[in-house]
Every structure is written in C-alpha cells, then in structure tokens.
Amino acid sequence: MALRGKTVVITGAGSGIGLATATAFAQLGANVAIGDVDAELAESAAQHLAGYGGFVDVRCSASFEAFLTAAEQALGPMDVLVNNAGIMPTGAFHKESEDITDTQIAVNLKGVIVGSKLAVKRMLPRRDGHIVNVASMAGRLAIPGLAVYCATKFAVVGLTESLREEYRDHGIYFTSILPAKVTTELAAGTEGADLGIPSSSPEEVAQAIVKAVLKQQGEVAVPSYLGLLNGMQGFAPKGVLRGIRRIFNDQRILHGLDEKARQGYNQRIKKLSDKER
C-alpha cells in the first residue's frame, strides 16, 4: 500500500507510541487522524502534523463512531486504523481493585473490538483497508504482576488472528503488534523490574507499524527477534521454561517497581476508571 494521500486513524495518539506512529505516517504523506481521551492533547498534536485531532473514548462505541465520522469528513475514507489506546496497571492480582480490572478490559480489549468492528463495516464496501492492533509481548508471554493486562493482550492477539482468517477474502488486512518494554509513561517505574529484555523507543514501534502496513504483515514483535520466544513456548518442557523464568526472576515486576515513579501514571488510570462509573 502506498501511503501518500491515505487516511490513517490512530487511537491513544496524543503521546507515546500513538503520536510516534502518527508522525511516521505523516512523514510518508499520509493524512493522520489523532484520537485521544485528552482532546486538547490530540488537537495540539494534530496541528503539528496538519491532521485531524479529536476526543475519543474507545470504551464507548458512540464516541468511537463519532470520532471516525469526523475524521473521515476531514480527511477522507479511512484506509488504516491503528487501535493503540491501552493502559497497564501493575501489582499483585489479588490486590487489584475491581474498577481498575474493569477499566483495563474496557480500554485494552473492548476498545479494540469496538474499533475493529466499526472499521470493518466501513472498509467492507470498498474491499480495502488495514487494521493494526497494538498488543504486547505480554500477549504471548505471561508476566507475573500483569495478570489482567496479559489477559487483555492475549485476547487482542487471538481476536486479530481470528479476524485475519474471517476476512481474508474481503481485502481487509489485520496486524497485531507485539512490543516488549517501550520507553513511555506506561513503563514508568519499571526500571528496577527489568527482565533483561531490551527496551524499544516509541519511534521504533512506530516504524514497525508502518512496515507492517506497507508489507501487509500479520504479526510483528518489537524487537523482531523476540518473536522466536513464541516458538520456545510450544516446544520446551514446562519445567525448563519455569527454570528459565526463575533465572531471570520473572516476578521482579511484583517486587522491583518504583511506586513513586509510577504515581502520576497510576493517578491518570484512576481518573479514567472513575469516569467509567
């Protein structure tokens, strides 16, 4: 797909991976629509990229549809949707509040389902389009301390695989992006819980997304070599895998977090959760 003149819609794009992705597509001549729950942030970012920016709460189908309609009116029919919005609370499963659990499921999973469904309906008549769902390596590799987050990302990977097969003869492509640790606010305070997996910048993830659209790739790990870990899970005995986990101390995220560094991010999640009530 040549990107010049194409309309690319991105959620959670006021900052981080979303903004880096919008910038990367804009640099290749695409028209970008930046959606975010922070409307002011979205509009400001869009001004710098000569695109469209607006409010979207991905948990609400009416909000999502209104955003897509406004974006298409401003830029033309949507060619690519990047479902990027997501949150990552951390900590012991039994201590996580019901409100935070519900918000994770609503943003990380329901938001992707809602966005994908609305996009498919718009793309089917043209038999053309590409939907990119930003999941995580935590959607393939379980991480203690991120139980519900992992559950939502595993679900996004499964959803994307299913949709890829369901619409394979209808001209719509589906990609799941699996970043490891990314240097954004979402990972704040996890430095002491580093599992030995290298960090990627938002720009590196953005380039992987652009490449996936250009080459119509189905699943992309970032960094790419981490995709090999998926194969290990299928062949290595569980005892061996658990031994490797113990060597790397995979429970570090439960004990090595800098809660002070995550305070600002946790407050933002709580505000989002409070709005859902």
Image (spheres, rainbow, N blue to C red):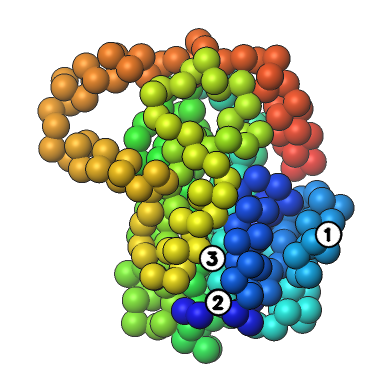
| Identity, as a three-letter code, of the amino acid under mark 2 | Leu
**CA–CA distance between discs 3 and 2?**
20 Å
Q: Which mark is residue 3?
A: 2
Q: Is residue 233 above or below residue 220?
A: above
273, 133: nearer the viewer: 133
The residue tagged with tag 3: helix, strand or loop? helix
Check the image and name the residue furthest to the bottom: 126
Q: Earlier in the sequence, mark 3 or mark 2?
A: 2
Check the image and name the residue furthest to the front: 27
Q: Which mark is residue 129?
A: none
Q: Which mark is residue 116?
A: 3
Q: Earlier in the sequence, mark 1 or mark 2?
A: 2
Residue 219 pos. (x, y %): 36, 57
109, 129: nearer the viewer: 129
Residue 234 pos. (x, y %): 18, 40
The residue tagged with tag 1: helix, strand or loop? helix
Q: Which mark is residue 43?
A: 1
85, 183: nearer the viewer: 183
The residue tagged with tag 2: helix, strand or loop? loop
> Does residue 98 appear in the picture of this structure?
no
Determine the residue positioned at 48% across, 34% down. 199
Q: Rate crowding at label 2 as few (under 14), some (14 to 19) or many (20 or more) other CA atoms within 10 Å.
A: some
